[in-house]
Amino acid sequence: MNPDLLISLVGEQPTPIFLVHKALDPVQHLLVATSKDAVKRAANNIASTLNLPKSAILPDVDSYDIKAAAEKIENTVEDFLPNGVHIALNLTGGTKTMALAGYELARKHKWRIYYLETRRNDEVLHRYDFTNAAEPPTGPHQEILPEILNISDYISIHGFDPSGRGSTNDPFEREIGHILSGLPYEALHSFKTGQIEIDFIVRKGNRIAFIEAKSGNQARKKSGIDQLHTAASPQHFGTYVNKMLIGDELLPENNTILANSRDIRTLATPSFRSSNHISEEDAQNLKTELERLFA
């Protein structure tokens, strides 16, 4: 049953809120945000991507005053409180004290509760139901989310224009793009916005990976590591993204250590250096590493 109203506690990461919205398809959606800049930015980006009205954002909710937060949310949704109106609460984001406020409201009014668990290769939506305000909710009832995210929406919910493009003339990138085109992933070649440049954004299911490709003199340098680290920082695309650096030569040991410390998977395709073409063996290694990246 689609909720008449979905109430989501918003944190700094917009993707879980977006995924729950797409999974539940509510009639209306209230985004509960604090005064923190990163949270306000996430709420605004979610509302813009989902074409929600400005009134869909409840701003400046107290992060740590449970009573004040509960009262502000309850007063905002009072028109929905009569029996027969289906209200659901998404507790995935927000602070722990906001979650306590939300839980108390859900118990009081018997709202359905949802929580999205992000695992290594899928997302599980947990559902809890109150049948009696004096008892804990039943559940969890679990559902694995289907594929409901695309790259354009992913870029948009982080506040960037999906149409931003960089150059696609690099021969090494074109070789990698050709390999990606034959795989069961969505792939975007050369995204650029402001100071952020990403050679490839790749999606499998609802998971995202960034790939940087470096050849020639750049293959041994740390510029690709820095680009991936910047793009996946909290103020840009957040930390929940897989990262891979592909070069036509092995990284030196110090840069390999740096990449590992930043959770960046590295791969060398040395065949390109000698022939301007990625061999079948190197292409297969790339496919295998991508599978491991999303595993």
Image (tube, grey):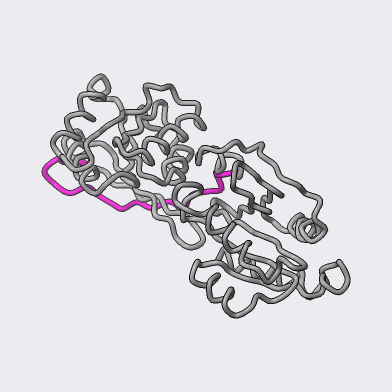
Q: Quadrant of residue 293?
A: bottom right
Q: Is residue 205 above or below residue 249?
A: above
Residue 100, position as x, y percentages in the image = 19, 45
Dominant secondary structure of the residues highlighted in magenta in the image: loop
Residue name at image x 45 percent, y 26 percent: 52
The span picked out in magenta is 130-150
Total number of numbered labels?
A: 0
Residue 170, position as x, y percentages in the image = 80, 55
Residue located farthest toward the top when viewing the structure as drawn:
79
Camera-side residue: 185 or 141?
185
Q: Quadrant of residue 99?
A: top left
Is 78 left, or right, of 164 in this rendering?
left
Residue 54, position as x, y percentages in the image = 41, 22
Residue located farthest toward the bottom when viewing the structure as drawn:
253
Residue name at image x 21 percent, y 36 percent: 62
Residue 268, position as x, y percentages in the image = 71, 73
Q: Is residue 252 above or below residue 219?
A: below
Residue located farthest toward the left when viewing the structure as drawn:
134
Camera-side residue: 112 or 276?
276
Is 78 left, or right, of 203 in this rendering?
left
Residue name at image x 60 percent, y 36 percent: 161
Q: Is 148 one of the magenta-colored residues? A: yes
- Which image quadrant: the C terminus? bottom right
- Which image quadrant: the N terminus? top left
Q: Is 77 one of the magenta-colored residues? A: no
Q: Quadrant of residue 57?
A: top left
